[in-house]
Amino acid sequence: MATTPNYGWVTPAPSNFVTNLPADFETFADAADATVKALNPGTTAGDLDYYTSGTAKSRLAIGTAGQVLKVNAGATAPEWGTVSGGGYTLISTTSLTAGTSVTLSSIPSTYKHLFLTISGLTCSGNDDIWIRFNSDTGSNYTGIDFNDASSGGAFNLSRLLFSDFASANADKSAGELFISDYLDTTQYGKILRYNYFGKNTAGTQKYRFGQGYYQGTSAISSLTFQTASGSVTFSTGTLKLYGIS
Amino acid sequence: MIIIHNVETNEIIEREPTAEELAQLAIDQAEATAIKEAKAAKEAARQTLLERLGITADEAKLLLG
């Protein structure tokens, strides 16, 4: 008997003396049937099949609603997965209604950049607001800023000055902080951009915007907002943290 | 009071500062005071120069373009 070249199905060779053709045909057909089925492993509407070798296939059951086809982590097979949202994803919302220090901890390491907004802020009195990352008190913060009266800033401080005119003014203040590459572990890899608008106690409109960097060599996993005095408290306000993919 | 918001679990802890944190606050305040004093000294020097030149701050801005 002979065999077919690709799948080895048994078949009478031209030189064979056939004694039981129906039996030979049944053997051939059963083998062909098994091969065809193996190459079409689907069992349910929506199934996909993919090659696991040069001659074998496997079944990929249909995914759940909204999923897309992608390659698995080992780059060995396709799989269904959830689409990354991209853009800005709200991680947390925190009320600034008490305390002199508010820390956002356990910041996920699944984004590329962080964006923080403060809105509707008032404090119990006049004070500066400083920012610290990872409770790092080293001289790792640099911020160069411009405001309505002058420019200034400093290199290598132990925290970042975010506002120097937070107040109890009922016309609330607002600001933003953008941290690029917050997971970067190189010394100058995390760039900061920030701005702050509001009124001081005298009712004078003020603005402040600046740029700087954080020299700490750990990924940022926590952020602390604190009043400089340690006695002036947050009265109103909302702090929102966004992750940017 | 210190507030800690774990953004992963959404747990919020409110507590008083530790002795270590209060000590750090004193260090932070000393640094902030030094920065403000340096800024005030710079502003005073600027004012002295303007007065010596006999021009206002706005006139200085015009000069410097």
Image (spheres, coloured by chain):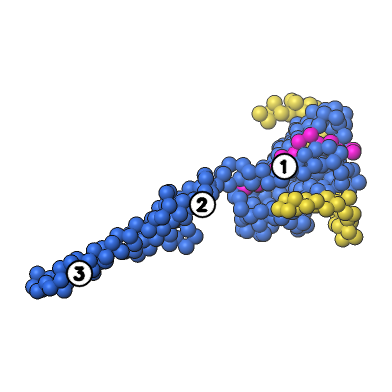
Chain colours: A blue, B yellow
The tag earlier along the polypeptide, 3 or 2, is 3
Image vertical order of residue A148 relative to residue A181, above or below: above
Residue linked to disc 2: A81
Residue kind at label 1, given as amino acid type? Lys
**Left or right, A79 with reference to A116:** left
**Is the magenta region chiefly helix, strand or loop?**
strand
Crowd tier of the residue under label 1, counting other residues whose Cα lies within 10 Å: few below 14, some 14–19, many 20 or above: some
Crowd tier of the residue under label 2, counting other residues whose Cα lies within 10 Å: few below 14, some 14–19, many 20 or above: some
Q: Residue at x 51, y 51 (%)?
A: A81
Number of numbered discs overlaid on the protein picture? 3
Element type where label 3 sits in the image: helix
Specify start and end residues of the magenta stretch as a single range: A113-125
Element type where label 2 sits in the image: strand
Image vertical order of residue A15 relative to residue A245, above or below: below
Residue B15 visible here: yes
On whether residue A173 falls in the magenta region, the answer is no
Crowd tier of the residue under label 3, counting other residues whose Cα lies within 10 Å: few below 14, some 14–19, many 20 or above: few
Residue kind at label 3, given as amino acid type? Ala
Which-is-in-front pick, marks 3 and 2?
Answer: 3
* Chain ID of residue with mark 1: A
* Chain ID of residue with mark 2: A
Which-is-in-front pick, marks 1 and 2?
Answer: 2
Residue linked to disc 3: A23
User: In the image, residue B31 lies at what x, y percent?
Assistant: 83, 51
Location of the N terminus of chain A (image quadrant): bottom left
Q: Nearer the viewer, residue A57 or A128?
A: A57
CA distance separating discs 3 and 2: 48 Å
**Left or right, B15 with reference to A39:** right
User: In the image, residue A92 lies at what x, y percent?
Assistant: 71, 45
Query: Which label is found at residue A240?
Result: 1
**Left or right, A80 with reference to A35:** right
Q: Residue at x 82, y 29 (%)?
A: A171
